[in-house]
Image: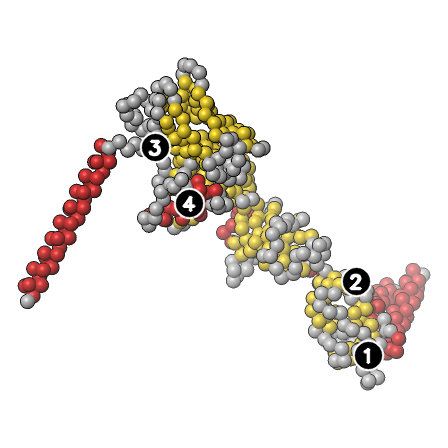
Amino acid sequence: MNTYKTALKQMGILMAMLFMLTGCTQQKQATAAAAAGEKVEPIRVTAYSAKSELFMEYDPPVVGEKTGFLIHLTRLSDFKPVTEGGLKLVFTPAAGEPETFTLPAPTRKGIYKVEATLGKPGKYSLELITDGNGFGDKISVSEVLVMNKGEKPTAGQAAKGGAIAYLKEQQWVVDFMVTQPVKKDLGSFVNATGELVPVSNAEATVAAPLSGIISTTRQLPFIGKKVAKGEVVALIDPPVRPDGGIGQLGAAFAEAKNRVALAQKEYDRAKRLHEAKIAPLKRVEEAELSLSSARSALDPLEKAMGSVKGEGSGKIAVRAPISGTVVEVTAGAGKGVEAGQPILRIVNTGTLWLKANIPANEIGSTGKSLNATFTVAGLTDEFKPTRLVSVGDMLDPQTRTLPVLFEVPNQSGRLKVGLFANVAIRTGSVAGALALPKDALIEDEGRSFVFIQSSGEAFDRQEVKIGVEDGGFVQISGGLKGDERIATRGAYYVKQAESAAKGGADQGHGH
């Protein structure tokens, strides 16, 4: 039984090999038959004017016979089809009168079909003249070769296309454009992460100067409310016990004030006696030290009195030390507070700091004069700090980055404290760089590619080396000469066409 199964298996293999050999032979025969037949590859021409792209297909013209010209016209301004207006084809032979053929309007958007019969063999130059509404143009084609009857096209007369077919009808219906690389001055940058933080002296926590209860007679400011410096933001009812509140603060302030007055008198008297050579210098120094000590004790009490300034009924008025926006409220009406306990936090956001974290391996390239721009999520604008505040001297041990502070104006209030930012710090410039829009680049396995238009409906993939990136443009440091036409918008669609071709999808032209 096993021998029988083995024989059947071997026979199956032989039949499969015979089928494959037969298929290959038939394929070769079909190819030879097509080569010997009369089917001729159409000629494809791609030409440009300042305003238009022409892609034209036609069979090799034979003298005295009709030749169909399939013409695609694309506006270079937006890479969309020419949709209206007539077209005139002027064929000019090397000797003799020109022959003109006209079509009043496109057969359909972007496409003109013209049948022309040329009376003489030889080389013609061709001009295509459009007269569309607001879009007149003239495109020149250097050579159209008209053959005698029975003459065969010379090898290479039909222009070869690229490896990737992407038809005009596909290009016109998507956001697509082909342009040439440009020469631009580009800046080189170090990219870093950052965060918007308050300026150090533009943030203040308002605390209870004395123990008491947050009064219910005045509403505390809500988060987001703007307050002015000196504005009353809270009232505190003095505690029931007599040893606290505004009364004790006032008594302590009056006592400290009297001590300063007495110390000042003693200092003045010691100074006069010393000048009269009655008292030693040591007495003057002791009096001066006592005066300084008394003033030190008075200063905080004086500031406290200035900030609380008791309101009617003996309530303690708590005032905002700075102008800004209330960003946090930690107490509530009717709740008891101890001296020094936070009530609310105020931040002045008219100016912010951008704290950028520069990677350790990029410190050497940033230099001393740091010029930066940044973007934040949710806002489309690019922002620019007004000045460099400081550069840190120590790396963050966790992130291995160096903190750098920039000052950022924010009078509009659009930027918010705590927002994360993408920061670009300029490190230099490249003059006259060959550049393409960033959208033209396709990343594949860590390498960069572009799609070069080899003819109107054909593209080739080309690997390129890239350099600095600035303002949406990328430097091309290798892989291009500079005169190519590149899919700079919609390159992804060409990549899809490439994948479809590899998968065996039909890319034939249908008109």
Residue 144 vs 319, above or below: the answer is: above
Q: Residue at x 13, y 55 (%)?
A: 13
Question: Between tags 4 and 1, which lies in front?
Answer: 4
- The amino acid type found where label 2 is placed reads Ala
Q: Secondary structure at mark 4?
A: helix
Q: Residue at x 72, y 75 (%)?
A: 331
Q: Which residue is mark 4?
A: 494
> In the image shown, does 370 or 482 lie closer to the viewer?
482
Question: Between tags 1 and 3, which lies in front?
Answer: 3
Q: Count residues near mark 3 (Cα–Cα under 10 Å), then give few for <14, some for 14-19, many for 20+.
A: some
Q: CA distance from mark 1 to mark 3?
A: 97 Å
Percent of width and height locating residue 364:
53, 48
Question: Between tags 3 and 4, which lies in front?
Answer: 3
Q: Which residue is mark 1?
A: 237
Sooner in the amino-acid sequence: mark 3 or mark 2: 3
> In the image shown, does 281 or 209 lie closer to the viewer?
209
Residue 125 vs 420, above or below: the answer is: above
Residue 276 vs 467, above or below: the answer is: below
Q: Which residue is mark 3?
A: 42
Q: Which residue is mark 2?
A: 228
Q: Residue at x 36, y 36 (%)?
A: 161
